[in-house]
Amino acid sequence: MEIFRKIIAVLGLILLLSGMAYYFLFRSDGEKYLDQGKEYFKESKYKEALFYFEKAEEFDIGEALKYSGTIYLESGDPQKAIVKFDKYLQIGKPSDNDRKMLLNDLGVAYFKLNEIEKAKIYWKQAADLGNITSANNLKELETKLVK
């Protein structure tokens, strides 16, 4: 029974080491930076996350633009968020869900800059793709404009 446990432990260690080897040997530096940024993002360590996302951007990892844009938007810098989101929409390959969220976030960024017409354009595009939040933003905006 003891030998069986040792064999299982050794096999587990081999699997762990092979997974780590794959990660370190076959993933690009940009992907490593993106992964590290995501870890910090999950922990709400946005300053650290932003550092790694911007390093990933240097390696043309488009997905990093989405995260850095979100950090800028949430930290009160909508102008920088717009640059990141626009670039991701142009060069990245966002999924349909990401596209809906990016368009909504662009609307939010423009709204924060008091560029209401641009906000409406992006919220309309996102709503047309099925983003309920954007549809609600448009309804609320129209209600406030009528008053």
Image (tube, helix red, strand yellow):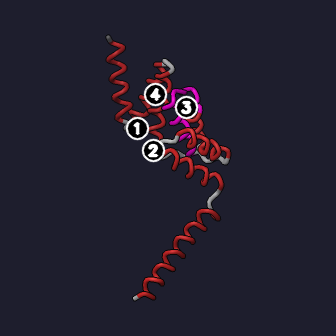
In the picture of the structure, the residue carrying the numbered disc 4 is 108
Q: Is residue 142 magenta?
A: no
In the picture of the structure, the residue carrying the numbered disc 2 is 96
Please give the name of the residue rendered at 54% of the width and 32% of the height, measured from the top-left corner: 72
Q: CA distance from mark 2 to mark 4?
A: 19 Å
Residue 129 marker:
1
User: Magenta stretch?
Assistant: 63-83
Q: Earlier in the sequence, mark 2 or mark 4?
A: 2
Q: Residues within 10 Å of mark 2 (few under 14, many from 20)?
A: few
Q: Is residue 71 magenta?
A: yes
Q: Give the image location of residue 15, x and y in percent.
A: 52, 73
Q: Residues within 10 Å of mark 4 (few under 14, many from 20)?
A: many
Please give the name of the residue rendered at 40% of the width and 38% of the height, measured from the top-left corner: 129
**Quadrant location, the C terminus:** top left
Q: Earlier in the sequence, mark 3 or mark 1?
A: 3
Q: Quadrant of residue 57?
A: top right
Q: Earlier in the sequence, mark 2 or mark 1?
A: 2
Q: CA distance from mark 3 to mark 4?
A: 10 Å
Mark 2–mark 1 CB contact (< 8 Å) = yes
Q: Secondary structure at mark 1?
A: loop
Above or below 12: residue 42: above
In the picture of the structure, the residue carrying the numbered disc 3 is 81
Q: Looking at numbered disc 4 in the image, what kind of residue is underneath it?
A: Val
Most common SS among magenta residues = helix
Please give the name of the residue rendered at 55% of the width and 27% of the height, measured from the top-left corner: 77
